[in-house]
Amino acid sequence: MNSTEVWKDVEGFEGLYQVSNMGRVRSLDRKDEIGRTVNERVLAGWYDNHGYRVVTLHRDGNTKKWRVHRLVAIAFLDNPDNLPEINHKDEDKANNVVSNLEWCSSEYNANYGTRNERMAKAKERPIYVVSGSGHRYFFNSTKKASELLGLNQSNVSKCLRGKVKHHHGFSFMWAV
């Protein structure tokens, strides 16, 4: 395995930012729009709500947020078929090393690895459905609760993950 870090300019931000094959992004030494000196540094970034590393890049007074894996793929991976998404081969969204990334279709990305098994397992966990009056009803799975109550399974899942509080007047909680 080659552990040498290689840096390339970020497309559209040449002379301002670079991305490495190891999944790091740095700003380069320069003067900003008002003449202040900006010293080279590796950007810390943050993780978005989906678990992807994100950095903010600035140019001409404009700001753009980028997911680091996309910057790495654009700089280091050929995409002759113009595929729209990038897959993390080891399923670790924090691992943005170029050897862990590949361009792919939406369908391939959605069905890659253990995602489907993890999703199916999550749908089989028992839950309580709580009515507006406070009554709790036990179901063996989100799938069963959704089918019997005529609910949207995706919205039930969002409630269980804390993304929304209610769906059709019900709230939801894991039974175990």
Image: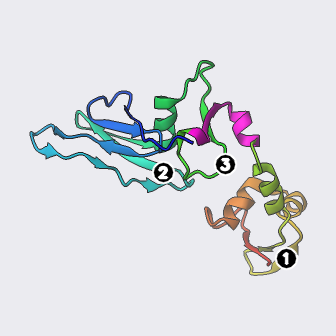
Mark 1 secondary-structure assignment: strand
Quarter of the image for residue 120 reads bottom right
Q: Earlier in the sequence, mark 2 or mark 3?
A: 2
State which mark lies toward you, 2 or 1: 2
**Residue named by callout 2:** 53
Is 23 located above or below residue 142 in the figure? Answer: above
Q: Give the alpha-carbon distance from disc 2 to disc 3, as whole Å.
A: 15 Å
State which mark lies toward you, 2 or 3: 3
Q: Residue furthest left?
A: 35
Res. 90 mark: 3
Q: Which of marks 3 and 1 is nearer the N terminus?
A: 3
The answer to if 120 sits in the magenta stretch is no
Q: Give the range drawn in magenta.
A: 99-111
Q: Which amino acid does label 2 sit on?
A: Arg
**Residue 152 shows in this picture:** no
State which mark lies toward you, 3 or 1: 3
Mark 3 secondary-structure assignment: loop
Q: How crowded is mark 2: few (under 14 residues within 10 Å), some or many (20 or more)?
A: many
**Residue named by callout 1:** 137
Q: What residue type is labelled 1?
A: Tyr
Quarter of the image for residue 5 reads top left
On the image, the x and y values in percent for residue 146 come to: 84, 59
